[in-house]
Amino acid sequence: MPEWPLLRALRGGHATRSLSLTGRRLCRLPWGLAKMRALECLDLRNNRLCRLPPDMEALGRLKVLNLGNNIFEEIPEQLMCLKSLQKLHLFGNKITRMSPLICGGLQNLVLLNLNNNLLSHLPPEIHRLENLECLSLNNNQLRSIPRELCSLQKLCELHLSHNSLTALPEEIGHLTELKILSLSRNQIEELPEGICKMVSLRVLDLAGNNIQIFPIAMQDLELVELYCEGNPLLQRHPVSAIQEEEVLTLKEITARFILAQLKSDNLSLHRAIKQNAEAQNILSQQRECAQCGCSFLNIWLECVQFVDVKQRMKTSRNLHLLPVRILLCSYQCFNRHDDGLFGIAVP
């Protein structure tokens, strides 16, 4: 490799704040780079790097580091010493694991780009990246995301497209600052109710999953863009139904009675429930009938309501009516439902 281009790049010496060594076929970093203590931006894209030298930690003022399109197999642990680092690009490598130690050292990181790698899981310690605002993990092999990720209170963008996700944690609703959530081309079959608590969410991309119906409170989200093409969404085709005899279990009858009493401010019952952890756990699974408003325990009748979203937001082409899950407590409530509700026919 020619020596002179590197010498010219390093000529700025100790005062150099920005350095680009892209596309130079580097297999290792040039000698003397660690002496550039004022360096704030370092671009090493499109090389052949697979490791970083130990003296990399001397670049204590580095704020932006681009290691995209190299051949790293894991995130270099030397990076955890770069306390000032704010933006880290590691896209287009061969990274299969993310060390928990990295998460403990990069507490000022606001952007982490790990697109186009081979990650199959994330460490629970990812919650230590407490200032992270944008996390991009498109085109990896993730089968799940840890619930600890949902503790990143400053996260505004989360990109998880083209992975192997089958579900999301219920705690996803804790990401109340999240504005963009990209989940296209995964294997998700059902969205958690928690997603409806993401009050700042404006863009939701769910294209190319296996979703048939959306959570009850989905229509309460103030989305600006919603993409759902390539999902087997339920269609509005009325079918005849046979009413079955309602036989409630003793547990269900008892739960409905207790839940009704709790709504009527039965103080003695409130006190008794507070002293019984098992009862609290059971009753915490209650649902509310969309027709009569009564509480019940087990899902009795699952229906679908088709909500017109085309006028409210930018959506996938041909998506006008969004199927939203509605729960009813009895056939009696189903028989007096309005024309906007449909029972779900199980094939």
Image: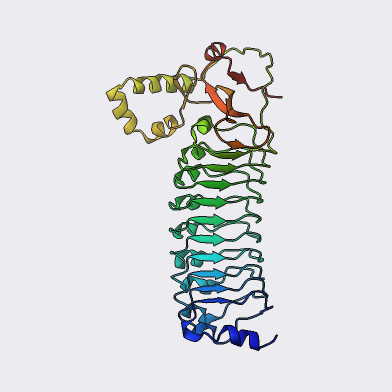
Left or right: 239 as drawn, with respect to 301: right
Left or right: 14 as drawn, with respect to 183: left
**What residue is rendered at 64% in x and 23% in y?**
344
Quadrant of residue 119 in the image? bottom right
Question: Is there any visible trace of residue 147 in the rendered image?
Answer: yes
Foreground of the two, 248 or 301: 301
Question: Residue 240, image x and y in percent?
Answer: 68, 13
Foreground of the two, 114 or 73: 114
| Vertical relation: 154 (above or below) 207 | below
| Vertical relation: 103 (above or below) 341 | below
Question: Residue 143, image x and y in percent?
Answer: 63, 50
| Vertical relation: 256 (above or below) 224 | above
Question: Residue 297, image x and y in percent?
Answer: 48, 25
Foreground of the two, 31 or 167: 31
- Position of the C terminus, as image quadrant, is top right
Question: Residue 246, image x and y in percent?
Answer: 56, 14
**What residue is rendered at 48% in x and 47% in y?**
178
Number of numbered callouts drawn: 0
- Position of the N terminus, as image quadrant, is bottom right
Question: Is there any visible trace of residue 99 in the rendered image?
Answer: no
**Picture colour scheme:** rainbow
| Vertical relation: 53 (above or below) 343 | below
Foreground of the two, 254 or 111: 111
Give the farthest residue toward the right.
347
Quadrant of residue 244 in the image? top right
**What residue is rendered at 54% in x and 66% in y?**
88
